Image (spheres, helix red, strand yellow):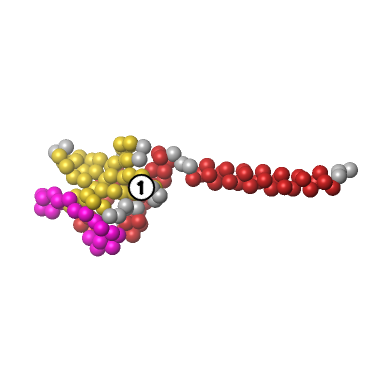
């Protein structure tokens, strides 16, 4: 027969063990490597681009954007985008069907642990979407650049 004090001690020990194990697994999930964090972000980005969901794409951008290249009649100009509303109002000019198509078929390149890019070329021109880890939000689209190859 067990003594009453033995079972009373077992309950607090069991509660502590459950609490420690439960806390450990949630911490492990939140401590993803930068590559895993980018992979999750990139999957959301590709899904939003494929569906052409303007609001979801805008939610993945770090505002204000200081450098977004816009090409008009062969002229390239870098502009800033102050906020989500401005991006959405100019969406068709800022994220063209061609850009979306390239975003879907171009493989991301790791520049640094906290910086990835989608880079493609057309004749002597290089295009790139730049993604950076922007704590506390995680990875975000930070710019679209056009330059010489």
Task: Tell me what residue is drawn at x 26 percent, y 48 percent.
Answer: 143
Task: Tell me what residue is drawn at x 71 percent, y 44 percent.
Answer: 13
Question: In this picture, is 129 found above or below 63?
Answer: above
At mark 1, the secondary structure is strand
Question: How many discs mark residues in the rendered view?
Answer: 1
Q: Is residue 33 left or right of residue 78?
A: right
In x, y percent, where is residue 129? 27, 45
Q: Is residue 15 left or right of residue 45?
A: right
- In the displayed orientation, state which residue is furthest to the right: 1
Magenta span contains residue 114: no
Q: Which residue is mark 1?
A: 134
Task: Tell me what residue is drawn at x 28 percent, y 59 percent.
Answer: 83
In x, y percent, where is residue 85? 28, 63
Magenta span contains residue 81: yes
Quadrant location, the C terminus = top left
Residue 126 visible at all: yes
Question: Along the line of sight, which residue is nearer the eye, 131 or 66?
Answer: 66
At label 1, counting other C-alpha atoms closer than 10 Å, the crowd grade (few under 14, some 14-19, many 20 or more) is some
Q: Is residue 102 left or right of residue 135?
A: left
Quadrant location, the N terminus = top right
Q: Is residue 147 left or right of residue 2?
A: left
Give the magenta part as a residue range. 71-90
Task: Tell me what residue is drawn at x 52 percent, y 42 percent.
Answer: 28
In x, y percent, where is residue 146? 18, 45
Residue 101 visible at all: no
In x, y percent, where is residue 54? 31, 58
């Amino acid at each position: 027969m067990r003594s009453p004090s033995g079972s009373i001690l077992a309950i607090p020990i069991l509660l502590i063990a459950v609490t420690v194990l439960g806390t450990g697994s949630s911490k492990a999930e939140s401590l993803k490597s930068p590559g895993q964090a980018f992979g999750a972000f990139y999957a959301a980005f590709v899904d939003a681009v494929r569906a052409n969901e303007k609001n979801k794409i805008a939610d993945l951008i770090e505002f204000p954007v200081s450098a977004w290249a816009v090409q008009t009649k062969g002229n390239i100009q870098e502009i800033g985008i102050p906020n989500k509303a401005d991006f959405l109002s100019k969406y068709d000019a800022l994220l063209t069907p061609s850009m979306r198509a390239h975003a879907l078929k171009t493989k991301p390149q790791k520049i640094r642990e906290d910086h990835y890019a989608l880079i493609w070329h057309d004749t002597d021109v290089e295009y790139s979407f730049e993604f950076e880890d922007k704590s506390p939000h995680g990875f975000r689209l930070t710019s679209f650049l056009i330059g010489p190859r």
